[in-house]
């Protein structure tokens, strides 16, 4: 099972400017189960994130790992010049945190690989104390630590290692012909539109409104549709929002299709679906004029059931239908859109690589 431990501050902790001591904060879970996998969530508001180094230490084991080390440096003289780092760091992410530097909505957002692998914490108890240290290595730019979280998959004993799968040979490009779609009918029902267009590729014709009104409703997007479908786009639960992959896959199964909800999916696995002739519904962050943009992940806990999940404002769905070595093609409502792979991967990462696929 997964457990989440967070420390957020009504008065954010200032990060001393150009100070090798930085600022530190401690989380101390009292849980003797061992870590199978670990993610770290950071919410740091700081100008010029290329100044920053972030280190995680478990004081019980003495193990330390550098999560972030001056992004963009030494590739550029002073590192990434843009502002704020609000991100999930996990070894399973597709892209490295050190290579990110955007102007909006944050210099670094989404899910990325840390500077040093978190695998070294596996097998140790999740109990702390855990210390996060944030250091500013250069003068002038300043900021604060607004919060951080440990998201750990834990077990009573460490399971045996999963055998390394044989390498997958994928074609350099693949494209699925025969897909078509329409623009969504309601302000927030993109998931229903994507679902019925995806289903039509396999044969079943399902009305968009029929699909939407068959979805369960909940304050938990992993359990049902959150909010008013006629509401304002760009919010996060419990406000008007939408629905995640599991309820969509469950309903597609009800309509007679083989559909599987996935999260933390790899880029290779995603391309393998396309190469095999199966389009994939992907959760991304949307912008105007059929564009995809980066998004900021947030942890949200539903009051109805205590379940937590990663959410992001401007959640949107598209259907991936093709890729080359540099680009992807998605069906966004009624339009086919070609995007750079980097832009797609950044947008897809905000909701932790969530999909509905035809294969488990």
Image (cartoon, rainbow, N blue to C red):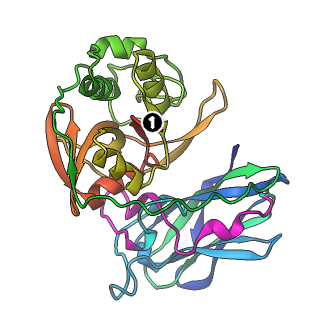
**283 relative to 9, above or below:** above
Determine whether the residue tagged by mark 1 lies in a helix, strand or loop: loop
> From the viewer's perspective, is 339 left or right of 273?
left
Q: Main secondary structure of the magenta part?
A: loop
**26 relative to 273, above or below:** below
- Label 1 neighbourhood size at 10 Å, few (<14), some (14-19), many (20+)? some
User: What residue span does the magenta drawing correspond to?
Assistant: 99-125
The residue at 35%/20% (across/down) is: 229
- State yes or no: residue 110 in magenta: yes
> From the viewer's perspective, is 314 left or right of 113?
left
The residue at 41%/70% (across/down) is: 47
Does the image show residue 226? no
The image shows residue 341 at horizontal and vertical percentages of 26, 59
Judging by the rendered image, the residue that carries numbered circle 1 is 236
Looking at the rendering, in which quadrant would you find the N terminus?
Answer: top right
Does the image show residue 217? yes
The residue at 21%/38% (across/down) is: 331
**30 relative to 256, above or below:** below
Q: Nearer the viewer, residue 338 or 288?
A: 338
- State yes or no: residue 121 in magenta: yes
Examine the image and state in which quarter residue 94 appears.
bottom left
């Amino acid at each position: 099972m997964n457990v989440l431990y967070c420390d957020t501050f009504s008065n954010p902790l200032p990060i001393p400017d150009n100070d090798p001591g930085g600022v530190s904060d401690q989380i101390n879970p009292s849980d003797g189960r061992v870590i199978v996998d670990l993610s770290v969530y950071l919410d740091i508001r700081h100008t010029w994130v290329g100044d920053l180094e972030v280190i995680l230490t478990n004081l019980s084991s003495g193990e330390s790992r550098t999560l972030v080390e001056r992004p963009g440096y030494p590739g550029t003289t002073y590192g990434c010049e843009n502002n704020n780092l609000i991100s999930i760091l996990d070894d399973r992410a597709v892209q490295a945190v050190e290579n990110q530097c955007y102007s909006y909505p944050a210099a670094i957002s989404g899910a990325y690989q840390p500077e040093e692998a978190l695998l070294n914490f596996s097998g140790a108890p999740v109990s702390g104390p855990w210390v996060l240290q944030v250091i500013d290595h250069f003068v002038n730019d300043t900021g604060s630590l607004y919060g951080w979280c440990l998201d750990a998959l834990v077990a009573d004993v460490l399971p045996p290692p999963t055998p390394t799968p044989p390498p997958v040979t994928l074609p350099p490009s693949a494209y699925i012909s025969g897909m078509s779609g329409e623009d969504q009918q309601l302000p927030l029902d993109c998931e229903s539109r994507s679902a019925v267009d995806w289903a039509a590729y396999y044969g079943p014709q399902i009305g968009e409104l029929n699909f939407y009104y068959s979805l369960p409703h909940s304050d938990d997007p992993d359990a049902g549709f959150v909010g008013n479908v006629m509401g304002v786009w760009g919010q996060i639960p419990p406000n008007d929002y939408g629905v995640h992959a599991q309820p969509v896959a469950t309903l597609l199964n009800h309509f007679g299709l083989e559909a599987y909800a996935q999260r933390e999916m790899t880029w290779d696995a995603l391309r393998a679906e396309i190469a095999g002739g199966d389009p994939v519904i992907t959760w991304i962050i949307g912008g105007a004029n059929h564009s995809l943009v980066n998004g900021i992940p947030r942890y949200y806990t539903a009051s109805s059931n205590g379940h937590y999940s990663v959410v992001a404002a401007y959640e949107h769905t598209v259907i991936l239908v093709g890729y080359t070595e540099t680009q992807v093609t998605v069906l966004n409502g009624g339009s086919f859109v070609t995007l750079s792979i980097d832009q797609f991967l950044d947008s897809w990462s905000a909701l932790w690589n969530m999909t509905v696929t035809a294969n488990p």
